[in-house]
């Protein structure tokens, strides 16, 4: 008789729930990474604008153009502040999702451990039965040999 784990459907469900939580966690990590890249781009844009401003100021620049560059730099800094706020919120989501993922993983591992323990008990019982069968077979042979002919 083959081993059958009665909770196998529940184990499959736990695995799919863990996979779903892992995917959600990875999506949040990806979103955080995208926000980080956007912040880096804004930093680079501000740096480039500041360098251009220095070059143009040395060569002479109209006040209106100076004001436009200044507004652009301020706008980039505000955008970065918004992105940083989003990153803080996403970090909290990441922490919550990581807890959900770890919880789903823990529940799956509990069922897998139960399955492994039942499989181990099944194999021990099968080994015991096989040994009993061999012992019985040996006893029958011995009894036949011992019978007077």
Image (spheres, rainbow, N blue to C red):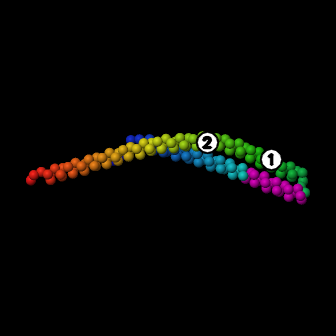
Q: Which residues are magenta?
A: 41-59
Q: Is residue 14 visible?
A: no
Q: Is residue 87 left or right of residue 139?
A: right
Q: Residues within 10 Å of mark 1 (few under 14, many from 20)?
A: few
Q: Which residue is disc 2 drawn over?
A: 95
Dot 1: element: helix
Q: Residue at x 54, y 43 (%)?
A: 102
Q: Main secondary structure of the magenta part?
A: helix
Q: Is residue 105 left or right of residue 44?
A: left
Q: Residue at x 58, y 45 (%)?
A: 25
Disc with the residue nearer the chain's start (1 vs 2): 1
Q: Residue 21: percent from the left, percent from the top?
A: 55, 44
Q: Is residue 95 left or right of residue 65?
A: left
Give how far apart the Cα atoms at labels 1 and 2 are. Answer: 32 Å
Look at discs 1 and 2 and give the one toward the viewer: 2
Which quadrant holds residue 82?
top right
Q: Residue 8: percent from the left, percent from the top?
A: 41, 43
Q: Residue 68: percent from the left, percent from the top?
A: 84, 50
Q: Which residue is disc 1 drawn over?
A: 74
Q: Residue at x 74, y 47 (%)?
A: 80
Q: Residue at x 16, y 50 (%)?
A: 143
Residue nearest the observer in this picture, 80 or 116: 116
């Amino acid at each position: 008789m083959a081993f059958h784990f009665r909770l196998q459907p529940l184990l499959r469900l736990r695995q799919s729930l863990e996979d779903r939580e892992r995917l959600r966690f990875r999506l949040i990590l990806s979103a955080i990474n995208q926000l980080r890249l956007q912040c880096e781009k804004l930093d680079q844009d501000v740096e480039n604008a500041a360098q251009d401003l220095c070059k143009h100021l040395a060569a002479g620049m109209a006040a209106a153009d100076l004001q436009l560059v200044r507004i652009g730099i301020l706008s980039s800094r505000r955008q970065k502040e918004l992105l940083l706020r989003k990153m803080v919120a996403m970090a909290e989501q990441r922490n919550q999702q990581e807890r959900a993922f770890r919880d789903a993983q823990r529940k799956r591992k509990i069922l897998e451990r139960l399955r492994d323990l039942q499989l181990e008990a099944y194999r021990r019982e099968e080994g015991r039965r096989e040994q009993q069968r061999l012992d019985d077979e040996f006893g029958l042979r011995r009894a036949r040999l011992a019978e007077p002919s």
